[in-house]
Image (cartoon, grey):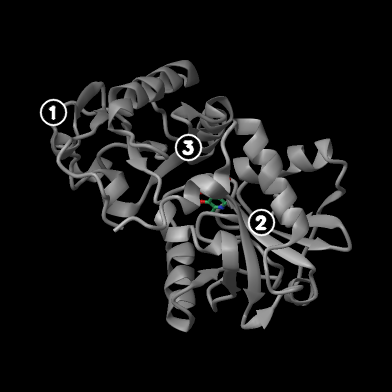
Amino acid sequence: MLEKKRGKERIVYLDGRFVPESQAKISIFDTAFHNAYMVHEAIRTFNGKLFKLEEHTARLFRSLRCARIDAAMGPSEMKKISLEVLEANQHLLGENDDYWIYQHVSAGVVPQFRYEDRTYKDSTVIIYCWMLPFKAYARYYEVGAHAITPWVRRISPQCVDPKIKTCSRMDLNLGTREAKLIDPDGYCLLLDEQTNVAEGDGYNFFIVSKGVLRTPSLRNVLGGISRETVMELAKEMKICVEETDIQTYDVYNADEAFFTATSYCILPVTKFNGIQIGQGKPGLLTKRLLEAWSNKVGINIVKQTLSHLEEK
Ligand SMILES: Cc1ncc(COP(=O)(O)O)c(C=O)c1O
């Protein structure tokens, strides 16, 4: 999606330097580009303030450890630089805008592509921001999204643990491509090898059945920070949550369903493989959770997003 604000360049952190976005260049021999060997985080702001920076950065360092990448800095420095990137770009935020801040760490230049007479770092660290694309998903708060199970399965935990937030996302990318072929408004929802529901291309999944919130356990999905936030809110609201195996049968028969992700927080799902879920509109519990999240961050999440619908 093209960004609406052009002209004024954002500042990016790349390997120890703050540079304008157009000058942030990495080698074509970097593992990030060469074989998608990179882990990352996406953190959002509410009213220009980062939400759960601590939790996201902690997850980044857990991913780095499993991916065997040494960022050559600790979590404190990563957080400090992330805040500096945000500060350097705050003035570009318009009314009702908010940012994603991305932390990307690759394994540096592929060892086979290193010149003998040069020195290399064993990681490349990039931190940048991007305006949240509210307009892209705003209408789904009102009508709900269509979840579609593609043929491709979520990568098995026996191969790569989905708890590592990696940029190697061929399964998820293919899932999106297939879902969009079936319905341009479709969002993929991948199953795992045992045909249990897993997650989508950048989001976790919940259903509501008889007042109980159910979501796949961390065996086959990323431990989403938004997933965690929903579970915290549910606890405060005395709503029962089950982390469990979910089959397509359960989704077809659910009363409500929704996705969770850093950008939209909670996105109602009202259709599954062409079949209406519950009443076919965003559910009551889904709306209550969105309201509770809005109260937590002091911003009406839905209203903020819908305010972007009129944009050209
Ligand atoms: C595969 C996958 N699942 C779930 C999520 C949602 O995680 P979070 O709530 O931390 O944004 C993401 C986020 O990008 C993701 O990539």
Q: Nearer the viewer, residue 140 or 115?
A: 140
Q: Amino acid at mark 1?
A: Arg
Residue 93 vertical placement versus 266 (above, below): above
Earlier sequence position, callout 3 versus callout 2: 3
In this image, 192 relative to 184: left or right? right
x and y, in percent, of residue 102 in the image = 39, 37
Dot 1: within a 10 Å radius of its alpha carbon, few (fewer than 14), some, or many (20 or more) residues?
few
Q: Mark 2 — residue?
A: 220
Q: Quadrant of the C terminus?
A: bottom left
In this image, 130 relative to 164: left or right? left
- Numbered label attached to residue 290: none
Dot 2: within a 10 Å radius of its alpha carbon, few (fewer than 14), some, or many (20 or more) residues?
many
| Residue 192 seen in the figure | no
Of the two numbered discs 3 and 2 in the rendering, the one whose residue sits closer to the viewer: 3
Q: Mark 1 — residue?
A: 118
x and y, in percent, of residue 135 in the image = 41, 56
Residue 72 image-quadrant placement: top left
Q: Secondary structure at mark 1?
A: loop
Q: Amino acid at mark 3?
A: Arg
Q: Mark 3 — residue?
A: 44
Q: Amino acid at mark 2?
A: Asn
Instruction: Give the spatial CA distance, label 3 vs label 2.
Output: 24 Å
Residue 212 image-quadrant placement: bottom right
Q: What is the tally of numbered marks visible in this picture?
A: 3
x and y, in percent, of residue 54 in the image = 56, 25
Of the two numbered discs 1 and 3 in the rendering, the one whose residue sits closer to the viewer: 3
